[in-house]
């Protein structure tokens, strides 16, 4: 086997490893459910691993005070807090599956690609 064949075999193996890690990370992120509630417990939001709102629960008592602005603030805050928790769960999944970048940061959305770019020409990816 000549050097170019060995390089290609190594690159294909790295691609297969990365593809497997990405599939595992995608599956893990798909399963994430994070919940956050307003301080008074009247508004609860459930967010998925990609930050999408899956459920919004409003306690019946919320309708006693007909202040739409306050209700909107509680909803936004609950969704924001749940999304932050879901993002942290996704980061934890990414930390387990992907090599950390030089800075130590883990980004579940761009981490795999940045990891390849960090490795430079030896990874088979051009900058």
Image (cartoon, helix red, strand yellow):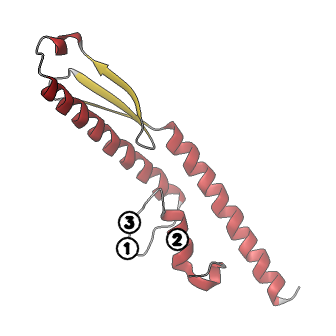
Q: How far apart are marks 1 and 3 (CA)?
A: 5 Å
Compared across the picture, whether 37 is left or right of 25 comes to: left
Q: Distance between the residues labelled 1 and 2?
A: 11 Å
Q: Are marks 2 and 3 in contact (CB under 8 Å)?
A: no
Compared across the picture, whether 83 is left or right of 121 comes to: left
Q: In which quarter of the image is residue 13?
A: bottom right
Q: Are marks 1 and 2 in contact (CB under 8 Å)?
A: no
Identify the residue shown where x is 66% and y is 59%.
19
Identify the residue shown where x is 38% and y is 66%.
105
Question: Residue 108: x, y in percent?
Answer: 47, 56
User: What residue is pinned by disc 2?
Assistant: 115
Q: How crowded is mark 3: few (under 14 residues within 10 Å), some or many (20 or more)?
A: few
Secondary structure of residue under mark 2: helix
Quarter of the image that includes the N terminus: bottom right
Quarter of the image that includes the C terminus: bottom right
Q: Are marks 1 and 3 in contact (CB under 8 Å)?
A: yes
User: What residue is pinned by disc 3?
Assistant: 105
Q: How far apart are marks 2 and 3 (CA)?
A: 11 Å
Q: With respect to residue 7, does 73 lie above or below?
A: above
Of callouts 1 and 2, the N-terminal one: 1
Q: With respect to residue 93, does 82 lie above or below?
A: above
User: What residue is pinned by disc 1?
Assistant: 103
């Amino acid at each position: 086997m000549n050097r170019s064949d060995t390089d290609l075999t190594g690159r294909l193996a790295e691609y297969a490893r990365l593809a497997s890690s990405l599939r595992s990370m995608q599956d893990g992120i798909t399963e994430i459910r994070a919940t956050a509630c307003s301080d008074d417990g009247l508004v609860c939001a459930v967010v998925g691993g990609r930050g999408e709102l899956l459920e919004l629960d409003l306690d019946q008592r919320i309708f006693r005070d007909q202040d739409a602005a306050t209700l909107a603030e509680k909803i936004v805050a609950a969704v924001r807090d749940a999304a932050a928790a879901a993002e942290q769960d996704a980061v934890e999944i990414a930390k387990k599956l992907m090599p950390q970048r030089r800075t130590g940061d883990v980004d579940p959305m761009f981490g795999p690609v940045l990891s390849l770019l960090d490795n430079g020409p030896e990874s088979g990816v051009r900058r």
